[in-house]
Image (cartoon, rainbow, N blue to C red):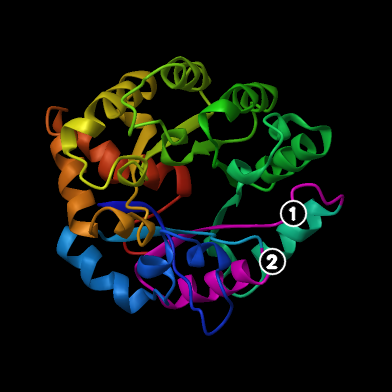
Amino acid sequence: MRVDAHHHMWDLAVRDQPWTAEPGLAETLHRTFTLDDLKPLTAAAGIEASVLVQTITVAEETPEFLVLAEASPLVRAVTGWTDLTEPGIADALQSLKESPGGRWLKGIRHQVQGEPDPEWLIRDDVLRGLKAVGEAGLVYELLTLPNQLPAAVKAVAALPGTSFVLDHCSKPPITTGELEPWATRLRALASRPNVTCKLSGLVTEASEDWTTEDLRPYVDVVLEAFGPDRVMFGSDWPVCLLHATYAQVVEATEELTEELSVAERDAVWGGTAARVYGITPGL
């Protein structure tokens, strides 16, 4: 079973996505992207299941995504958003799990990359929230920049009972070609057994005229650090459209993983995501 472990959707008729209107993004992203737009792309790539990930820190979005997943044979997991720092986070998570389509809630995410404090993840109120996520049986997705990885390492180490997923390999500086200090920090995070990594979002960290070889050093570090059984493919559609089509992201990932064994490729292309998000074929 092939799984796209990271994509988004939004409907500007329901609510605006202000970030998509920023310079350099608006021409490509400031429009509605729906399941009907995605389905032909996943079908062409042989993708059978997907993980729909939150896009904005608005509480109403997550219930909408859960209802969408309930009606879709493609979306088999939702990573939503709720305020980690709220004292009542455990009740909020339980409410989401009991809402229509709540069985598809598998993770929580916050755009930590936008937090000015590089140690936001290890604030007492945040750690309390991250613990509640784990106690609710959900994964927590780390959307971080390289300078936030040291705090991510501390948070993951402090909460061995919570499963973490690193989004977009923590956005390495592909345009500059530099590996350090990103690589060392990533390896430190990968040394913790309760964290996995999405092979996603790399094309938008590269230049517009990127090649597969531009991505290869970073992908090699990720695969070596985590091992294929803790790595999963994600398209990051439609954000990937800034620099690549869905098909181009799939093609590049296939090329970058072609030297793995069959079992290792199966893990990257679906096995890891199925295990982490509890995705069962046919359900």
Residue 46 appearing in the image: no
Q: Secondary structure at mark 1?
A: loop
For the C terminus, the image quarter is bottom left
The residue that disc 2 covers is 59
- Seen at 72% across and 34% down, the residue is 117
User: What is the residue that sits farthest to the right in this orientation?
Assistant: 87
The residue that disc 1 covers is 83
> Which amino acid lies under the numbered mark 1 shown in the image of this protein?
Asp
Residue 55 included in the magenta stretch of the image: no
Provide the residue span drawn in magenta: 58-87
User: What is the residue that sits farthest to the bottom in this orientation?
Assistant: 13
Q: Is residue 99 above or below residue 207?
A: below
Q: Specify whether 194 is left or right of 4.
A: right
Q: Specify whether 100 is left or right of 168.
A: right
Mark 2 closeness class: few <14, some 14–19, many ≥20 residues within 10 Å: few
Q: Is residue 218 above or below residue 198?
A: above
Mark 1 closeness class: few <14, some 14–19, many ≥20 residues within 10 Å: some
* Distance from Cα at disc 1 to Cα at disc 2: 8 Å
Look at the numbered discs 1 and 2 and tell me whether their residues touch, using CB distance below 8 Å: yes
Residue 62 included in the magenta stretch of the image: yes
